[in-house]
Image: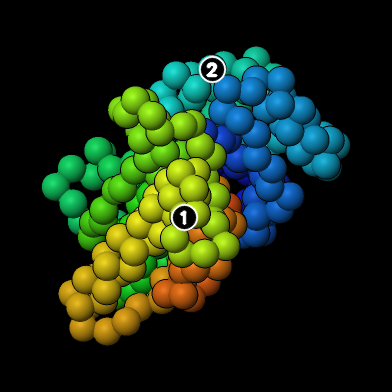
Amino acid sequence: MPGYDPDAPVIVIEIGNTTTAIGTWHKDQLKTPLSVSTDDEAGFDQALEAHVDAMPKRRVAAVIIGSVVPQALQRIQGCLENRFDLNTLVVGDTIPLPIDVGVADATAIGVDRVCAAAAAYDKLQTGCIIVDFGSAVTVDLVDDEGTLVGGAILPGLKMQLRALHECTAALPEVKPGLPETPYGRNTTEAMQAGVCRGVVGAVRALVEAYANSLNRWPQVLGTGGDLTLVGPICDFLDTQVQYLVLRGVGVAYMKHLKAMGV
């Protein structure tokens, strides 16, 4: 990449099933992250312009995307390439994954999980567990050598509550919430308590099993859209980090530059 300034700020984007996050990556740091609904095209345009306005001379050096939603990726790439005179860089496609992946098919694992693992290991430089409370809940393990060795996927809070409503005749449509008591005092609270505390219990069991496989208790990082809700009852979390996947998109770009000798 001759003549390219590695210190120039760039735009990083994470396209998720529910939300899309956008931020500026500058000098190995994530700046001013914003989130919009993945279906909100106008909201994305506004968030993009806010970041462009903050760029020196409104010049965007590069745009790096991590996505698990192919249709949204195609739409956003088209928007960006019409808006800027540059090609977007896509993690796992036009630039490599930012961490070694020790599973049978590294191309099949979600880019969001890989980016979160890369950001966590880049921060800690040791084996760790990453719990992402998103549309799905993922619990992933990175070993001491910095390899994402695998993980587990559970239905997210909204998904479970929606299934209870859609697959029964009488259970209502309920939003995630955490009742004051561990037991529900009505149907809505019973569904919320069962799903929220049930997910936390399942994650705790997975974390303990991973710790046994490492023969020690590793650092456990939490992230994701529902972290604010369930984080207070996750006493096994050592660190809570918002926008961990988006940070991993920046790490992927940083490693790409290094590999290119920039």
Question: What is the distance, in whole Å, between disc 2 and disc 1 at their CAs?
Answer: 43 Å
**Which is nearer the eye, 197 or 146?**
197
Q: Quadrant of residue 84?
A: top right
Residue 158 visible somewhere in the drawing: yes
Q: Residue 184 carries which label?
A: 1
Asked if residue 26 is positioned above or below residue 55 in the image, the reply reads: below
Residue type at mark 2: give it.
Arg
Residue type at mark 1: give it.
Gly
**Which is nearer the eye, 233 or 98?**
233
**Which is nearer the eye, 68 or 121?**
68
Q: Say which residue label 2 marks.
A: 75
Quarter of the picture holding the N terminus: top right
Closer to viewer: mark 2 or mark 1: 1
- Residue at 46% of width from left, 75% of height from top? 235
- Residue at 50% of width from left, 54% of height from top? 185
The location of residue 243, given as percent across then percent down, is 58, 52
